[in-house]
Image (cartoon, rainbow, N blue to C red):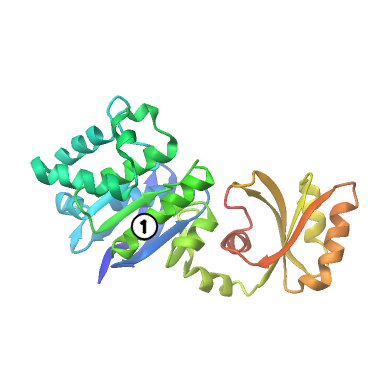
């Protein structure tokens, strides 16, 4: 059974096409990632799926209900976690959830029970829930944001970059929450520009660029699709664009680019090759030739970010 059906959807803003004749189906219980840089059309697509934006053309269904013609039925099936925090700072967690619960038509003991379930599910302790949201960390606010979207027990959940701006500890805590929702049989659409998030969580990934899906499959299938296996990662004390061009022109190098590690806050040179053992000495020598210090070198398998750059010629964060 398909919980989401997007059929030939286009969204135009005056003379700009944000989503271009896009079709996509998501089966019940599947976690699909929309991966791409800012401006690829990910958020526009999820806003149309949620009913916040109307498509210029095409149709969208959630379960058996049409988003455009049966919006109230769709809202019963759908939980939306926006990228921006949608909470009232002067209320605490319970008060915020009580407010949103009443908007969903929940009252009395049922609402109280549901709030307590979700506070336990999102691991917010009793002391924390009594403080105003303005005093919460970014990770705590994200958890309450997720809880608010789950109050009415939706089958389909849209997560728009839920871990953006979080430290590694809070990011992995939210990953656990998402994995638990999947284990409960929820259908989840996750928009992200972080390839490690997509690789870790998603059954399938739709790589988006310029409003289109340019590749679709499991992370493993997408890596196989580009017919590459290995990456040399060199962390220098400085990563200059001229050095990237030099590496690209080396024999045996299929691609090279600068990647930013959000956890370590460092820049690294990524070199895609079929023969890492053969060209590794030459790569290190080329990096160090102009007085650049090599801090570390690592051999690894090709990632989704490597796939994206191979398909589009640009970084996920450009």
Please give the name of the residue rendered at 37% of the width and 52% of the height, measured from the top-left corner: 45
Q: Which of 149 and 249 is in front in this view?
A: 149
Q: Nearer the viewer, residue 244 or 150?
A: 150
Q: Where is residue 164 in the image (x, y as percent from the top left)?
A: 48, 44
Q: Quadrant of residue 88?
A: top left
Specify whether 264 is left or right of 136.
Answer: right
Please give the name of the residue rendered at 78% of the width and 45% of the height, measured from the top-left corner: 240
Which residue is the site of mark 1?
189
Please give the name of the residue rendered at 28% of the width and 63% of the height, measured from the top-left corner: 184
Q: Which of 193 and 114 is in front in this view?
A: 114
Q: Position of residue 170 (x, y in %)?
A: 47, 45
Number of marks drawn: 1
Of all residues, the one furthest to the left in this rendering is 108
Please give the name of the residue rendered at 80% of the width and 48% of the height, measured from the top-left corner: 242
Q: Report if residue 18 is visible in the image.
A: no
Specify whether 111 is left or right of 44.
Answer: left
Q: Is residue 93 placed above or below 117 in the rendered structure?
A: above
Q: Nearer the viewer, residue 193 or 181?
A: 181
Secondary structure at badge 1 equals strand
Q: Report if residue 279 is visible in the image.
A: yes
The quarter in which the N terminus is drawn is bottom left
Q: Where is residue 194 in the image (x, y as percent from the top left)?
A: 53, 53
Task: Bin the neighbour count of mark 1 within 10 Å (Cα to Cα): few under 14, some 14-19, many 20 and up.
Answer: many
Q: Position of residue 156 (x, y in %)?
A: 27, 57
């Amino acid at each position: 059974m398909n919980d989401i059906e997007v059929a030939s959807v286009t969204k135009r803003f005056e003379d700009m096409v944000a989503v271009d004749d896009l079709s996509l189906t998501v089966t019940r219980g599947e976690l699909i990632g929309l991966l791409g840089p800012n401006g690829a059309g990910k958020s526009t697509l999820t806003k149309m799926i949620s009913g916040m934006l109307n498509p210029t053309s095409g149709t969208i269904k959630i379960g058996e209900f049409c988003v455009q013609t049966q919006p109230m039925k769709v809202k019963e099936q759908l939980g939306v976690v926006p990228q921006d925090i949608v909470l009232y700072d002067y209320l605490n967690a319970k008060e915020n959830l009580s407010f949103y619960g009443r908007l969903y038509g929940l009252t009395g003991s049922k609402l109280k029970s549901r709030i307590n379930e979700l506070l336990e599910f999102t691991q917010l302790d009793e002391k924390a829930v009594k403080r105003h949201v303005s005093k919460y960390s970014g990770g705590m606010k994200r958890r309450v944001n997720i809880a608010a979207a789950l109050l009415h027990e939706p089958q389909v959940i849209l997560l728009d970059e839920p871990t953006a701006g979080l430290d590694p500890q809070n990011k992995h805590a939210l990953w656990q929450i998402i994995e638990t929702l999947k284990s409960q049989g929820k259908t989840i659409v996750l928009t992200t520009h972080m390839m490690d998030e997509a690789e870790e969580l998603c059954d399938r990934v739709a790589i988006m660029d310029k409003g289109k899906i340019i590749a679709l499959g499991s992370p493993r299938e997408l890596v196989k699709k580009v017919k590459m296996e290995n990456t040399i990662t060199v962390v220098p004390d400085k990563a200059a664009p001229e050095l990237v061009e030099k590496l690209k022109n080396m024999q045996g190098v299929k691609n090279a680019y600068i990647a930013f590690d959000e956890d370590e806050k460092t820049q690294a040179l990524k070199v895609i090759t079929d023969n890492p053992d053969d060209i590794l000495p030459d790569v290190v020598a080329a990096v160090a030739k102009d007085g650049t210090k090599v801090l570390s070198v690592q051999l690894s398998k090709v990632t989704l970010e490597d796939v994206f750059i191979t398909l589009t010629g640009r970084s996920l964060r450009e």
